[in-house]
Each structure stands twice: as C-alpha cells, then as structure tokens.
Image (cartoon, helix red, strand yellow):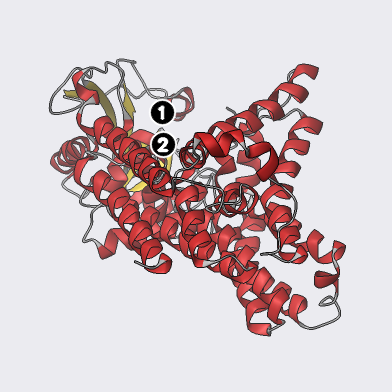
Amino acid sequence: MNASRAALLYGGLLCLLYALVPTLSFPNPPLDVVEGFAWGRDIQLGYTKHPPMQAWLLELSYHLTGGHAYGAYWLSAISIGIGYCFVWLIGKELGFSEQQRFWAIVLTSVTFYFTLPVPEFNPNILQIPVWAGMVFFFLRALNSGAVRYWILLGAVAAIGFYTKYFVFLLIGTIGLYALVYTDGRRYLATSGPWICSISFLLLVGPHLYWLYETDFLTFRYAIGRSNAAGSLFDHVYNPINFLLAQVANHAGLFIVALLGLSWQKLKTAKTSWSFTRGSELTLEADRFLVWFAFVPLAVVLMASAVTGSEFKHMWGTPLFVLSGLVAVRYFHLPAFWSAPRRAFTGALVIQAIFLGVLFGQAVLEPLWKTKQSRIHYPGKAAAEFLSDVWEKETGTELAYVAGDEWTTANVTLHAASRPSMFLEHNTTLSPWIDLDDVQKKGVMILWRGEDSGPSGRIMKLYPNASRRGQHTLPFHSYGTFPDLTINWIIVPPGSVATSVDDERTD
C-alpha cells in the first residue's frame, strides 16, 4: 500500500473511531458541548464565553441529526480529519516525501490533543483545522503568489476569529514572518496581503459590531475569569508549568519515535544523528517549519512570564499541529528508524488505549466512581421531567429556563420545546433574551442540590419566592453515582422580574 493511501486509511479510521465511541457509549455530552448547544439554540453573533462558530456548527448538527447531540462527536472527528489533510498538504508544499507525510500524520495523531479531548467539541478542537489551514494557505500564497490563496487565508482567519480570539496569535505570527523574511516582504507591495486583510475584515465585521453593541462581553468575561499573577513566583512557575504540560502532551509522539529505533541505532546515534539542515528540504522550508512550530509557543511563554498569568493547558491545542512534521524532519524519520513496523504498532496501541479510556469513562466509571460526572448526568430525563411539570402547571410549553449554566443548558438541549437559556437570569450574560417575551411566557428557575434556594442574585430578584418543587432521580442507570436532586421555581407570565442591575459580579 502506498503512503498516501495508508495515510487516508489510518487518518480516516481514527476519525471514525473517535466519533463512534462517544456516539455509542456517552449517555450525555461533555460540558463544553452542552453549553455550545444551549448557545446555538439562539443564533447570535457572539456568546458569553466565546465567539459563535462552535455554537453555530452544533446547532446545525442538531438539525441534521434530527434533534440528537451525537453530531458534536462527528464535528470533532471532521475537525481532526481536516487537520490531518492540511498536515499532509503542508508537508507536500515544504518538500516532504509521501512516506514522511504519512509518518507526520501518525506522530501528530498520538499527541494528547488529538486523542482523549477529541469528543469534547469546543473552540480548542475547532482551532486545529483553522490553524493548520491558515499555515497551509499562507505557505501556498508565498510559494505561488496567487491571489486566491491570500483570499482563502483571510477567509480561514475570519473563521478562526469566529472560533476563538486566540487566532490573533497566529495572525501575528504570520504578519511578523512577512515582515522579517524576504519571501514574505516581497509581497507587501502587491495586492495579495491587502486583499487578504480586506476579506478578513469584511467577514469579521458583523462580529466586531456585536462586540461593540455588547460592550465587548466576551473580552470582559475572559478578563473576569483570568488568573492574574499572585506573586513574583507566578512569573516563573506559570510559563514553566505550561511548557512542561505541553512536553508531556507529546509523550505519545516520543514513545512512537523511540519504538522505531534499534539498540544498534541508539549506540550510533552520536555519530549518525544530526540536527543540521539536510538536503531534502530547502533553507526556506526549514525556516518556515521552525517559525510556525515554535514562535507561537514562545510568545505564549513570554506573555505568561511577563504578566505572570496562568495559561490553561488546553489552550495549547492548536499550537502543535506541526509537531508531527517537526518530529519527522528533525528526528530524521523514518530514515533513522530500524523498526518502523514496531513504531506503527506502538501508535496503534496508544490509540487503542485512549479509545479504551473513552469507552471506560462512559461504561465503567459508574461502577466505582462516587463523584458525579458530566457525561453521565441524566440531562434528558431531567429535561423531560421539568418540561412535564411546567406544562401541567401552566398549560404551555416551557420557553425559558434560568439558573446556572450546566443545569439550564441541559434542559435547553434535551427538552422537546428547546427553551432558551436565561443564564443566571441576567440579560448581560444572555444578550439573546427578549425580556418582553419572557414576561409573556414566564420562566422556570432551576438549581441543583439540597440548598433552599437558587443563587443569591436570583433570590434578590424574587425575595418572596419559595421552592415550588424538588425531585430526585438516579444520576445514572447503574453504578455508584449519588442521585441528582433538582429544584425549581415556576415564575408565571406577567410575574418575571425585570428591574435589576445585570452586571456580572462574580
């Protein structure tokens, strides 16, 4: 089998498995997926935490699957698959052989971000094809000069902007490359980069207007949730912690690379292993690969060191789409290997382990775990019960649910009427809410646990309200999870509180 067919078969089978395992075994979607579905219920140009692309795609999948949530897992698989395709194309454009590109995909696939986190379709996963696509179209634009690639670069960058603002890191990396190196500077006086910029700005214009209209809601949320430096120690610890986490996330890649070696090769490594530029790639290709593999990471580390801020480890997801190509190039693979079959077997074993872990989380965790799990939350059962309570009480379909994000988002996803999520009963956090319509249809306030009431903010809105009901249901159909207790207050039409300061205070 030739390398291109092997890459297609390997990558396609992996994507299929990472979609099928959660589809067939997860009782409830993960946190970010449930939130994304709840946002997508009300199509907006932006949401509380993120730009809208994830939510839009999830809502599209909801309708394409006839009202099911498993479309999220296939969106993740498609994102990973597109990422593999761009890795192949980038390798081709840089001058890698087909065999090298195949191994680049294999090595990329065993890095952590392409395995266990895949079922949780969120902006981090969605950035993988975006970043890989931007790198490819920029490289293609540099090599060909064709205007269509500059336009495509601007369009994919806009998709990245609608996905997560972290894309500005790659946009800046591209812009800096174009300023520093001759192969980039020669285009600054041509129409290509300017058309790229115009296409980007035209596409992101609606979201920029939404940001202005909502007083930059997503930025304010991010600032409110960021972990600022607590001491001088954080300026050292946080960047080192982030870097070590990213190295650990490449453990699978290092294992596979080592498995291909023989003892004889290891003994002769000092004389045969060279990190100098080889004849198979041009200087420009080497420079391009190193720049986009390491500059974004270096910027993140420097930003963390200067500010002392903590960067979440998962934010590193898109930074390493080129890791497989880097490993193939600078570990001289597969030429340096004596046992490539053993390396490939190792990759298959690693994938089997991660897929087994996903399946085990879904099927086996309830047999021993006593802390409630998101993917085992009885979202559908709770939503159906609460919808029935509302309809019996009011004679109408449930249209709005207010409370914390997880409780309300599950009802928004699973209830037949798809009620809108009125997050924390706060119009600032829920800019899609029409208070006049809420007043006409009423709202159901929800919270979990044995507490006597919902959040303090909601209690201020309804100081005389008392719990109208409480219901306990099994957290899962079998196992050791403690039961779920859910509480509600029914606020009938005409009684919805509307006069309150909606600024976020927590």
From where the camera sits, is residue 345 visible? yes
Kindly identify the residue that appears in the image at 30 percent across and 22 percent down.
372
Amino acid type, callout 2: Glu
Kindly identify the residue that appears in the image at 25 percent across and 31 percent down.
360
Q: Calculate the distance from the C-alpha at mark 2 to the C-alpha at mark 1.
A: 19 Å
Position in image of residue 346 (x %, y %): 38, 40
In the rendered structure, which disc, 2 or 1, sits on the residue that comes first in sequence?
A: 2
Q: Nearer the viewer, mark 2 or mark 1?
A: 2
Q: Quadrant of residue 26?
A: top left
Amino acid type, callout 1: Tyr
Q: Which mark is residue 462?
A: 1
User: 10 Å neighbourhood of mark 1: few (<14), some, or many (≥20)?
Assistant: some
SS of the residue under disc 2: helix
User: 10 Å neighbourhood of mark 2: few (<14), some, or many (≥20)?
Assistant: some
From where the camera sits, is residue 493 visible? no
Nearest the camera: 472 or 149?
Answer: 149
- The reply to whether callout 2 and callout 1 are in contact (CB within 8 Å) is no
Kindly identify the residue that appears in the image at 42 percent across and 41 percent down.
117
Q: Quadrant of the N terminus?
A: bottom left
**Residue marked by disc 2:** 405
Nearest the camera: 307 or 426?
Answer: 307
Position in image of residue 440 (x %, y %): 33, 51
- Position of 374 with respect to 201 (left or right) is left
Kindly identify the residue that appears in the image at 47 percent across and 43 percent down.
260
Position in image of residue 281 (x %, y %): 69, 64
| 231 to 317, vertically: above or below | above
